[in-house]
Image (spheres, rainbow, N blue to C red):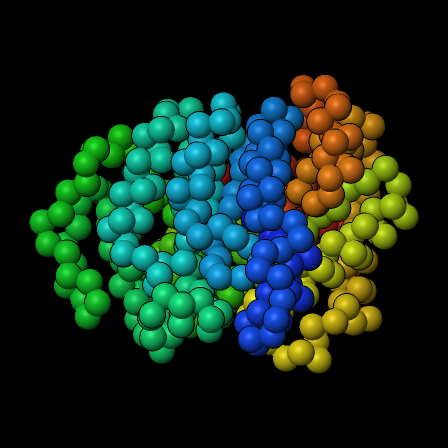
Amino acid sequence: MRVGATIFNQNYSDWDRYEAEEQGKPVAKRPARSDRAIFNEEIDIARIADDSGFDSVWTIEHHFTPYTMVTNPLQYLTYIAGITKRVDLGTMVTVLPWHNPVRVAEDVNMLDAFLGPDRNVICGVGRGLARREYAGMGIDQNEARARFDESLQVLTQLLATGQCEFDGEFYKVHGLRLRPQLEHDLSVNLWCAGGTEQTVQIIAKHGVRPLTIPTTSLDLALVNMRHYAELRRDAGYPPSHTKLALWTYVAETTSEAQAAAERHMVEYANSALRHYQLPARICGASRATRRTARNRTRCAKMPHRSRAASTITILGARRRRRLRERPSSLTPSALTRSCSSSSTAPCPWPRRKRACASLPRR
């Protein structure tokens, strides 16, 4: 079992001010809690994860709103590489249509060089969805699928061989060779989020392995991955495992975990709905949303110190202060938001056996 933690720099308390400002209403120019303070706190989480024995630290990419303020995940992880000693680093995800794929390959290659032979960069990519992000980037969202398809092909070539020959509608790359030269095949750690039918078709066609970040139930995510497996087989590729992202909250007691999870998980869902500008009628903490949070709450039965170590991905200054006061030699004992495991490893969470059973070690 391998366990990772995700940092995403969300300023949830600023949403009301931000939306009022977006509508032209008179509001304070700055949030009550500064974005920089949140950055510093999230960076501290990466240090704690590294010291506590987690296997990896991940981050994501979003723009322009309080949802998640990481505008360049590979740049962010390059800084994290310098303040950590042992964790692998991953993106979940770099949104390819917003970037030149040659630059993405160069940034992955540079980060791999910084990490050295004992650590890995895990390059998770995706297509993106938010209208305000495509508009802010000046990119026609109607071109997203074609841009993503071409970018994925260019990126795969470069990460696998360090060279690229490609002639597409958006990208024309000829005789290109990466420097510094690759030390090994980086495409083995290329993964792609497949949240839509179109994206699943593209990644299966090109043999890229799936990064599962469920936005619905795990049962529906499983159906999606079974469809991917069929398409991958039809394209002539061997079977593949997946990496799975999950929400997990661990606390001292079941009741404490449930109460805090219902707050933080609902807030995160609310933030996502507002960022993606989905219907306002579902932006509240509905009964169904709270039920989902309850279903995802986990209070693992583990030693006191291990429980403390696994709380780091759920935000809260009080918990972080308590965690920092504990010894740094803690070992992770529960899933955070990103997890991958061996298909033969026993699952320590019986009720999550379906979610864990088919995941790879790496």
For this orientation, the residue located farthest to the left is 175
342 w.r.t. 223: above or below: above
Q: Is residue 106 something one can see in this rendering? A: yes
Tell me which residue sits at (57%, 76%) in the image. Answer: 23
**Where's residue 358, x and y in %?**
58, 49
Q: Nearer the viewer, residue 29 or 316?
A: 29
Quarter assignment of residue 114: top left
Quarter assignment of residue 18: bottom right
Q: Nearer the viewer, residue 144 or 208?
A: 144
Q: Which of 120 and 106 is in front in this view?
A: 106
**Where's residue 24, x and y in %?**
56, 75
Is 87 left or right of 357, judged from the image as shown? left
**Where's residue 15, x and y in %?**
64, 63
Q: In which quarter of the image is the N terminus?
A: top right
Q: Is residue 236 something one can see in this rendering? A: no
Quarter assignment of residue 336: top right
88 w.r.t. 162: above or below: above
Total marks in image: 0
**Where's residue 113, x and y in %?**
32, 30
Tell me which residue sits at (68%, 31%) in the image. Answer: 332
122 w.r.t. 240: above or below: above
Tell me which residue sits at (62%, 55%) in the image. Answer: 31
Tell me which residue sits at (49%, 50%) in the image. Answer: 70
